[in-house]
Image (cartoon, rainbow, N blue to C red):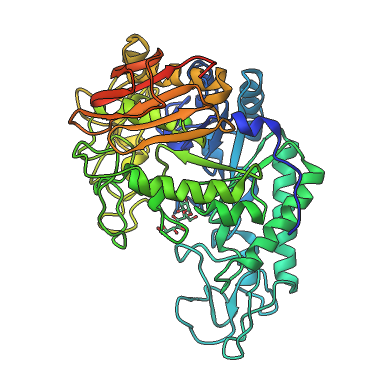
Amino acid sequence: MTSFRPAPAWLADAVFYQIYPQSFADSNGDGIGDFDGIAERLDHLAWLGVNTVWLNPCFVSPFRDAGYDVSDYLAVAPRYGSLDDLAKLVDEAGRRGIRVLLDLVAGHTSDEHPWFKAAAHDPTDDRYIWAAEGRPDGFVPSPGTRPGAYLPNFFAFQPALNFGYARANPAEPWRLPVDAEGPRANRAALRTIMDHWLGLGLSGFRVDMAASLVKDDPDKTETAKVWAELRHWLDGAHPDAVLLSEWGEPEVSVPAGFHGDFFLQFGGPTDGLALRSLWSNGEGTVNESWDPLDCFFDRSGRGSPRPFLEAWEKASTALGASGFISLPTANHDFSRLNCGPRTPEQLPAAFAFQLTWPTLPAIYYGDEIGMRYLPGLPDQEGSVLGPRYNRAGSRTPMQWDEGPNAGFSTAAPDRLYLPVDPSPTRPTVAAQRADETSLLHLVRRLVSLRTHTPQLGSRGSVEVLHAGHPFVYLRGGRYLVVVNPQEREASCTHDGARSGVPLEADGVAVNGSTIAAEGFAYGVFDLGPDR
Ligand code: TEU
Ligand code: CA
């Protein structure tokens, strides 16, 4: 197919850090995080060693889906500060070697967006998908003088932008081709939005629901063409910028034009098995449609790294050097690592794996200190999607310190975006910064090790020596990684193993070709250059 300019060189070394701006740091005591709050915490991020921040949507919005309902793509939400504050944040991040990505909600707007308000009164407007009469399945009645109904993309108040349909159907006259006027205007609008923010120094976008654009497009051919067109434009206009998709199927999204894609809790033929088979222990955020599974990072030892490995091998083989897969610890739609039966003692092994695998690691804010997923929180700005599909538990305030508001300025607890973990033993940044044996310090050392050791990065080779308990692999022919996420000890033998210099290890011993790991143990060993 079409060939794209290679990804900017910086992406191969990216260590992502996802910030949910509502909950990260509040500079003015109104209970909601903001740009200045983030800017004040850049030293924490620089100390941690992450180099690419992704901000969830921070645009003007009625916030019925936490900002994924955008009503002005070119202006920031006043609750987060001004455009100048964002510019200052980006600038100060840049001085610390940290790039900032924004979230591009490409598939839908808020029903309060002026485009939609205009469309709701103008039967000739085709920026959205509008059935002229009646209310077809899945459509929402018109709120304006225009008759008929519109197609939503997620919540009812998020009307789908019209990128056309992959095929016509005489029974559904609202289906327009991808080259109709509205779809063309929407593609142009995406360029305008990207151009605007990239011109201000942002480094790219995480693209929300990137697979959703063209409707009735089962193999995503037409959606891929939209992204390929945008990527070609980006390659010329902003060659140093990146597009990362919320798609969950890298072997489809990267050929479509994305520089990288995430393994997600959903997506692809296995509906997110790559990620869920690692982390999802049946508690926290659970979609009722997911079959129960035994995840690998679990004390029981019933899980296996194989489902992940299969998905990763398939995707990485398809990609070659054409793009990247990002492996997150969590995200704002999915459980944190510290969730349900997964206790803090189990987290080091998870990070030892995540930060030494040849995917691009994405640390979800707070996971570096082992913040807990808080079950049973009430809906906040659209966070609860179903009885068990509760996203609020992963969106609670960053736990900076021991104070009642965890460092959220002077705000009264009832003004916080979400409650702080009430546990007296909740982890905090302050306590962990002061304790070199903490998870935070381990994560920092692992990030540093990765950053300073090309063989441990995204382009280093990997050879799996034992796909079980313990999970053992060799990076760059030289670095042996061992993780045993279960409670029980485990051992294996492999010719390729031998004792080396432990760079980061707890509970793992390598004696000749025998690798013995205590429960919840991990180790990264340097076997030396001439193996
Ligand atoms: O999430 C998209 C998303 O989770 C669904 O598309 C997914 O396919 C479905 O839940 C099946 O599990 C993104 C954002 O990350 C999320 O926060 C937003 O609420 C949503 O889009 C709408 O913008
Ligand atoms: Ca604030």
| Nearer the observer, 366 or 224 | 224
The residue sitting at 40% across, 26% down in the picture is: 481
The image position of residue 173, as x and y in percent, is 62, 86
* Residue 321 lies in quadrant: top right
**295 over 464 or under it: above or below:** below
Residue placed furthest toward the bottom: 171
Task: Give x and y (percent) for residue 308.
Answer: 40, 46
How many marks do you count on the picture?
A: 0
Residue 214: x and y in percent read 61, 68
- Residue 54 in view in this figure: yes
Please tell me which residue is depicted at 37% across the width and 39% down the height of the picture: 395
Q: Look at 58% across and 86% down and name the residue there.
A: 172
Q: Is residue 294 left or right of residue 180?
A: left
Note whether 479 is above or below 305 in the view shown.
Answer: above
Q: Is residue 298 above or below residue 368?
A: below
Q: Which quadrant of the view contains residue 465?
A: top left
